[in-house]
Amino acid sequence: MSEKSRLFYQTRLRRPVLDRAEGIYLWDKSGKRYIDGSSGAMVCNIGHSNPNVLAAMARQMEKSTFGYRLHFETEASEQLAARTADLSPPGFDRVFFVSGGSEATESAIKLARQYALARGEASRWKVISRAPSYHGATLGALALTGYGPLTDPFAPMMREMPKIPAPRAYLDGLDPALTETGHHYADMLEAEILRQGPETVLGFIVEPVGGASTGALVPPAGYMERVREICDRHGILMINDEVMCGGGRTGRFFAGDLWGVEPDIIAISKGFGAGYAPLGAVTAHGRIVDAVLDAGGFAHGFTYAGNPLACAAGVAVIDEIHRLDLMANAEKMGALLKSRLHGLAERYPFIGDVRGAGLLLAFELVADRATMTPLPASLNAYLRLVDIAYENGLILYSRRTREGVEGDHFLVCPPMIVTESDIDDIVSLLVSSLDRFAAEAGL
Ligand code: PLP
């Protein structure tokens, strides 16, 4: 391998070269083994190299690897649409395929807009979102994203959408178990709708369980229900961004099902293809799809949409989730891992919060738990602890907690196939990593 890489991503940082992966493990070219404690970027939900998924992909490859959507349907895309509809809320009977999360959120917004046009509501174009939040890297999806370091550089190139605060009760000293807390944050949506003018607002996009930007934020009691009521009152579409939390790791295929609150449109990706293929989808209530199709069709699409190889992988992933009962395992192992993370918080006073649902879990480091004062930004804990864990053979995923400025949270989201003994291994690697971090940081 030459010294100068021909690749570039966000920085010049180079990681070891991946050799192979199986189950919850990855090996680099030197033979070093890592536990995939974050399923990549919360993607590889069913673990690596699942033989049934690989076999299904091989079978599809022998038949065809591309069929343009305007020329052909494929069995794989028909089957995946049917499997997805079976897992979706009642009435969500049609699916639009894409190749990733940003394409999914963009498509959701465009579907919402065309639905408004079909209903003669051309004045509705604003999509309210939350800060912090992440909805994708493309300019439209960035307009919804509430995370300054990623959006600010592109401010003149996109029309930023209105934001309301994410319901981070734990930072505001409110009790998330109280319905009043949920209502307090949801009512900020209504205030924003009124400020913008309800007739201009198209939708509200929300991650039912937060992803990287909030670190697995679970909404307070009553929040999702109240959001639904507010959207209904003002004729606004509720769009669930399930790109990260969807796919089963919360114990439900769609995390929104945890509250029994039905959105109007859902975007999904990551765990949908589970790392076997670039895949995502938008699914919506039939009344929305029908209105758009009746009004002349959905003016939108990507060349790779409904790719048969990606769809065959998606079908096999869903079949494996059912066959291995992985959503139940995510719920059970998630509860165990969460209790072990709470145990770590007893041991390390600088763990300020543990949160999440199922196997979408996170912990946050602070200087003072009582006030949730962040660690000094100069410590760069969000990078340093990840590097230490990486050296120790555990992969974690981290972000700055407070819109990129300060605060450090870490997602612990292993594949849904984890066992109790895998969780023991993850926790003992966390202990050795936190010990070293604490010693270095003088905590
Ligand atoms: N929406 C959410 C909630 C995400 O977490 C992400 C990616 O992390 C995206 C959208 C964008 O997905 P992608 O990176 O596949 O474009």
Image (cartoon, rainbow, N blue to C red):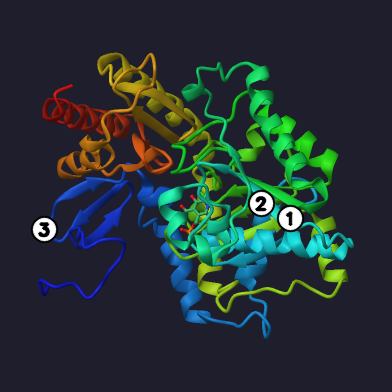
* Residue 335 image point, x, y percent: 45, 25
Whether the residues at callouts 1 and 2 have beta carbons within 8 Å, the answer is: yes
SS of the residue under disc 3: loop
Amino acid of disc 1: Ala
Q: Are marks 2 and 3 in contact (CB under 8 Å)?
A: no
Residue for badge 3: 30
How many marks on residues?
3
Q: Is residue 279 visible?
A: no
Q: Alpha-carbon distance for marks 3 and 1?
A: 46 Å
Residue shown at 36%/54% (left/top)?
48
Q: Earlier in the sequence, mark 3 or mark 1?
A: 3
Q: Which mark is residue 206?
A: none
Residue picked out by circle 2: 266
Question: How far apart in space, not on screen, are marks 1 and 2 (Cα)?
Answer: 6 Å
Q: Nearer the viewer, mark 3 or mark 1?
A: 1
Numbered tag placed on residue 284 in the rendering: 1
Q: Is the residue 313 above or below the residue 35 in the image?
A: below
In the image, 278 versus 140, the foreground residue is 140
Mark closer to the chain start, 1 or 2? 2
SS of the residue under disc 1: strand
Report the Cα–Cα distance between label 2 and label 3.
41 Å
Q: Amino acid at mark 2?
A: Ile
Local packing at callout 2 (Cα closer than 10 Å; few below 14, some 14-19, many 20+) is many
Please tell me how crowded label 3 is: few (under 14), some (14-19), or many (20+) other residues with Cα within 10 Å.
few
| Foreground residue among 21 and 109 | 109
